[in-house]
Image (cartoon, rainbow, N blue to C red):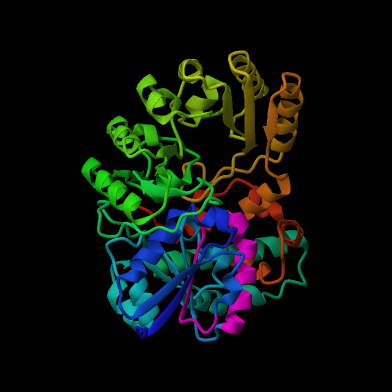
Amino acid sequence: MQNFNYNAGIIYPNKFKGGIACLATHILNENLSKYKNIHSGVYFIENYGTIKNSDAIIITLQYENDYFNVIKIVNELKKTNPNAKFIAGGPCAIANPLPLINFFDYFVIGEIEGSDIMYDIITGQDDDLRDKYYSKEQKSGILISSDILDIFETSGLSNLELSNYDEETQAEIYYNELLSVIEKIKKENSIKRIYPKKLGLEDYPIEQLTHEEGAYGKAFLLEIGRGCPRRCKFCMAKCIYYPPRYRKLEDLKYIVDEGLKHTDADKVALIAPSVSDYKHVLELCQYIKEKDVKISPSSLRADTLTEELLEILELKSLTIAPEAGSQRMRDNIYKDVSKENILNAVDISKEFGINTVKLYYMVGFKGEKSEDINEIISLTKEIKEKVRKVDVSINPMIPKPHTPFESHAFDLSSKKKIKTIEKELKKYKVSVDYENFNSMIAQTILCRGDFEISEVLKSVKNPNELIKSVDKDIYLCEYDTEEIPWNFIQIK
């Protein structure tokens, strides 16, 4: 039996179904498996409690609403893994680590392929990490939480004596002190995101665990590309995974061959922000189809959908994300798809027996008018006239960090807009799905949060408790672009 110097637990902080379909868990496990002195395993919400006396606990932060699970996991595992380093990574860690700064020792700011960053964090000391990843000119890849916490603790922000002032003056004093802290963090701890300039073969997880319960079924996950060439102003994935990078066709064919050889997958799930934007998508899909397995694309664009692609994919339903109902609003948010593109995609799909369409919309964009809401209804009705079944998913726009909309306010009137749309579309037997509104408010607070939110999270257990424990207007209002807490993260 091989002896390992270090044990690492990789955790997806939600159910097995989602975790097994999350490429990040496979990439992390593959990355650590190349080091002979590290043993790693992947865990989920169902079994993380079995981790004992580990040297490192690594949690991938894919969604803000998982934070309540994350905090529970961290608090429990700190008791059974007293010497472990707690490490966070993933899109939420890259975008804004501050809301969870109290719960992790390190945040990986970027993508790990082509680097030894995970190994260095697990096996090294803080001074070693600073020597390798920090210089006078630039810090990159790693946020050491203690560096940020030291600034907050020495600032006196949490010990301000404000009882002698009225509420307005209290808010002004606290706000000014907070601005000075944000400026100091930006000056002393500005951290540049790391990422591989090319997506190669060497770090790709071939021996993936598959299971029928996975979100894609028993599928091998094939990442075609990372980052998005489109211009949607609300999309965080475009910004934090910039620039868009696609894999070579020959590399993808090799990965498919090896993946199907080393797993029991009966399907290949194509992973990319927009699968149909890949210039070799037809050739790749034809190659996979010849392997006698099914193909499941994570996303398709209405304006790049073709008869040839639909013939190969053999889809049972079509998913389109118009995001907005009116062309005016789609132009405003840089969603480069027209009504003609959308209806044409539906018409083409019908030729291949597809009679179920899923539509994704958002409301709450700045400058949105009642006519824009009405056009969501009218566009959906027009599509329903063409197919047997239409399902709609609609949620408020959340102003995500590092996007062009990061400073915009969260629109509290979105709830009423969604209810209006639901009421009208029910007349046409269109089902409308949406997230709990408080959950969306909490997600906004969490993604835009600062050190104060990290303090509050020590004592709250769910979205409703979070909302009650903070002045939510501070986090839902329009931000001054110079005063954004996550400005110290350099994405580009």
Task: Read off the magenta span.
Answer: 52-80
Picture coordinates of residue 24 (x, y %)?
43, 57
In the image, farthest residue toward the left: 250
Picture coordinates of residue 33 (x, y %)?
34, 70
Is residue 270 shown above or below 457? above
Q: Is residue 463 magenta?
A: no
Q: Nearer the viewer, residue 242 or 354?
A: 354
The quarter holding residue 2 reads: bottom left
The quarter holding residue 166 reads: bottom right
Q: Residue at x 40, y 49 (%)?
A: 221
The quarter holding residue 227 reads: top left
Locate residue 455 relative to residue 111 in the image: left or right: right
Locate residue 159 relative to residue 189 in the image: left or right: right
Q: Residue at x 34, y 50 (%)?
A: 260
Total numbered circles = 0
Inspect this view and state whether residue 94 appears: no
Q: Residue at x 44, y 32 (%)?
A: 300
Q: Is residue 53 magenta?
A: yes
Is residue 215 shown above or below 415? below
Inspect this view and state whether residue 337 appears: yes
Q: Nearer the viewer, residue 258 or 33?
A: 258
Tell me the quadrant of the picture where the N terminus can be found: bottom left
Picture coordinates of residue 32 (x, y %)?
36, 70
Picture coordinates of residue 200 (x, y %)?
25, 53
Is residue 182 shown above or below 292? below
Q: Residue at x 28, y 56 (%)?
A: 196
